[in-house]
Image (cartoon, coloured by chain):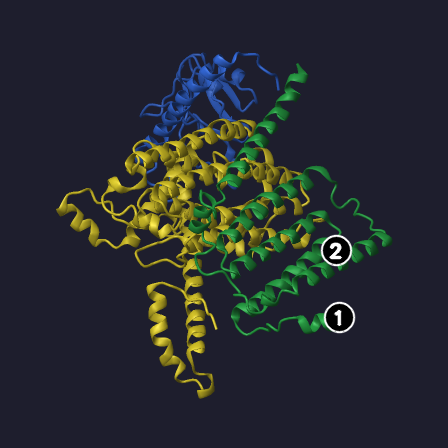
Amino acid sequence: MTQENISTKHYIKRYLKKCITGPWSLLCGLSVSLKYFFNPKKIVTEQYPENRKTLKMHERYRGRLSMVEDAEGNNHCTACGMCERACPNASINVQPTKNIAGKKVLGRYVYHFASCTQCGLCVEACPFGAIEMSTAFEVATTDVTSLEMILNKKEGQG
Amino acid sequence: MLENLLSNIPLTFPTGGIDIAFYAVAFVILAMAVCTVAVKNVLKSAVFLIFTFVGTAILYMLLQAEFIALAQVMVYVGGVVIFVVFTILLTSHLGEDNFSVNIPRTFAAGALSVAFVMVMVKSLFPAKELATMPSAAPEGYAGLKAIALRLLDYGPSGYIIPFEIVSVLLLATLISAVTVARKEKEEKK
Amino acid sequence: MYVPSVTNPIGDYVREWVPQLVAYLPESLQGETTCSVIAFAINAIICIIAVCLVNIGSAPILIYMERKVCAHVQCRLGPMRLGWHGTIQTIADVLKMLFKEVYSPQGADKKLFYLAPLIVLIAPFMIAALIPFGHNLLVANVDMGIPLIIAVNGFGVLGILLGGWSSNNKYSLMGSLRSGAQMISYEISFALVLLFVVMVSGSTNLMEITNGQAGTVANWMIFKVPVLGFLAFIMFFIASTAEMNRAPFDIAEAEQELTGGYHTEYTGTPFAMFYLAEYIALVTNSALAVTCFLGGFHAPCIGFESVDQILLKVPGVIWFFAKVYFMIWCYMMVRWTFVRPRVDQLMSFEWKFMLPVNMLLLVGGAAYIALSI
C-alpha cells in the first residue's frame, strides 16, 4: 500500500468531511432500497407456470423469428437476402422464385431455429421491416424436425 | 510427616450440592490442566486451556464472586486465549511436527510440580481456620457495586491510588504500542 | 443444604404445587430438600425448553423473512410455491439440511471440527436466557447481565476460529482469521456502547434497565438522552452487525472471495448449527437493542390518556416481539442495501471512527448524568 504524504490538518479535514458524506451516501442507498421494498409494483419477476394464461411478454423480448403479415397473410419480403447475409450462424435460408411476370419474389423463407441465437441482426438488416422477433418463448420441443420451419404462408408479392 | 499432614486435613467431605459441585469442578479443572500439558497439538492444548479457565470461573461462581468469574471469562477466554489461538494459527505449521519431549525434562518438570504442591500444602494447612471459615463470601460482598465502591473509595479501605496507577500504566502501554507501530512507518520513508 | 431457585412467577407457581406432588413419595424421601430440588429441576427444564423454543422456533421464521425482505428489495417475490406465499419453504429446507450426510473433509481434526459449532451456539443461547421478554417472562434475573453478555460473546470468536482451522482448508482458515480479527475489534465498541447504557440507567441488570425506561416514549434510552442516545443506538447497531458477521460486515463469509469462509467444509447438521447460531444471534442482538434502547416490553405510550389506555391493554410480550421484529427488519434492510468493505477499511473504521466516537459518547454520558443530577 502506498503511503500518502498529507499534512495532519488536511487529514483531519478529510476525516471530518467523510464523517458527513459517508452517512449521507449510505442514507441515499437505503432510500432506494426502501422505495423498492414498499412499492410492490416494482417487482419484475413473473410466477410463470401459474400465470401462464395472463402472462404478457415484454415488447423488447426476442423470441422466435417471425414474419410481419397482414390479415390476409401477405408479407413484405422481397427475397433480397439481406437477412441471410446478416445472420452470423446461417440460420436463415431465403429461397427466391419467379412469379408470373418473371420477377424475383420470395418462394420459401426457411428458418433453422435450432441454430438461431435470437441475436436480432436479421431484423436490423431487413430494409422493408418484413421480419420481427416474436414474443413466443415456450419453444421447447421433442421433435428436431419441427425446429426447421418455413416462415411465409404465401409466396412474396414483391 | 505424611501422617502428620493427613491428620491436619480438615474433614470437609461433600455435605451439600455446593460441595459436590466444587469437587466435580475441581476434578474437571485438574483433568483439563493435565490435558493442556499432555496433548501434543498446540491448538488443542489451547482449547483445553479454555476449559480450564471456564472451570475456574465456575469455581468463582460457587464462591459467590460473580464479577471475578465474569472477569475471568472476559479476560482469559475472550481475550488471552483468543490471542493465543491467533498467534498459533498465524505462526506455526500445525500438524507437520509435534514437539518432541525428552525424558529428563519430563522428570524435572514432574519434580518441580511435586515440590510446588508440597509448598502449597505446607503453607495452607497449618491455618486452623480453614475448616471453620465460611465457604463463600456473603451475598453482594463481591458484587459489582461493592467492588466498584471499594475500588474508587478514598478512605483507608479504598483502592483509588492503585486503580489510578493501573490506568496510567495502561495508557502508557497504549501509547507505546502506537509508537512501536509508528516507528516502522518512518523507517520505510 | 443450599439449592438454587428460579425466581420468576412460573417458578413460584411450581414451588407452590410441588409439595402436593412430593406427598405421593415414600415417607423417608419427603422433606424441604426434596421439595426444593424437585421444584428447581422442574423450573430448570421449563426454562431450558422456553429458551430453546424462542431461539430455534424463530430461526425458520427469520430465514423466511430474510428471503422475502431480500427479494422485495431486489424487485423479486422470493419463495412463492410451497404453501401460502412460500411459508412452508423454510421448513422443507431445514428438513433437507437435517437429512444430509454429516461429513468431514480428509485431514480435518475431527474432534475440533464437531466441537466448533457447539461452541458457537453457547453465546446466543446464554444471552437469550437473560433477556426480559415481558413483565414476568424472564429466565434468569442476573444482577450482572451486561458483563455476562460481554463475557459470553467471546465464545463466538473461538468457535469460528476453531471451525476454520479444523476444516483443513485455506479458505476456511483465512475466513476464520479475518472474522476473529473483526469480532475482537468490534467487541470493544460493543462493550463501550453497552457501558454507556449502564452508565445512564445506573444498573447492569437488564430488567432494571428496562424498567428504567417505563412510561412514555420520551423515557426510552434512545430519546432519554438527547442526541447521544440516538448516536449510541446507531453505534450499537453497527457494532452488533459486525459482531454477528452479517453483511455489510460479513468479511468472514465473503462468498465471492472465500467461498463461504469458516463454514465452507461443513455439511448437514453442523452447518445447520452455524446457520442457527447466526440467526439466533440476530434475535438476541435485536432483543438486546430493544431492551437497552427501545424500552423493552413497555408499550410506546405517547402521553395522551385515551391512546395510552388502548396501547397498555396489549401485553408486553407482543410489544417486545413487535419491536424485535422491527429491529430485525432494519438489520435485513441494511444487509441487502450496503456493500461489503475491504478488510483494511473495516479495521480502520473500527479503530479510527467507532472507538473515538464511543469514547466521546462515554464522556458525553457522564456529562449528561452530572448535569441532570
Q: Amino acid at mark 2?
A: Ala
Apparent colour of chain B:
green
Give residue B2's mark: 1
- Which callout, 2 or 1, points at the residue further toward the start of the chain? 1
Taking the image as drawn, is residue C230 in sight? no
- Disc 2: which residue: B38
| Residue type beneath disc 1 | Leu
Q: Is residue B170 above or below residue B184?
A: below
Q: Secondary structure at mark 2?
A: helix
| Chain on which label 1 sits | B
Q: Nearer the viewer, residue C144 or C294?
A: C144
Res C30 quadrant in image:
bottom left
**Which chain letter matches label 2?**
B
Along the line of sight, which residue is nearer the eye, C6 or C159? C6
Q: Do marks 2 and 1 share a subunit?
A: yes
Chain identifier, yellow in the render: C
Answer yes or no: is residue C118 visible: yes
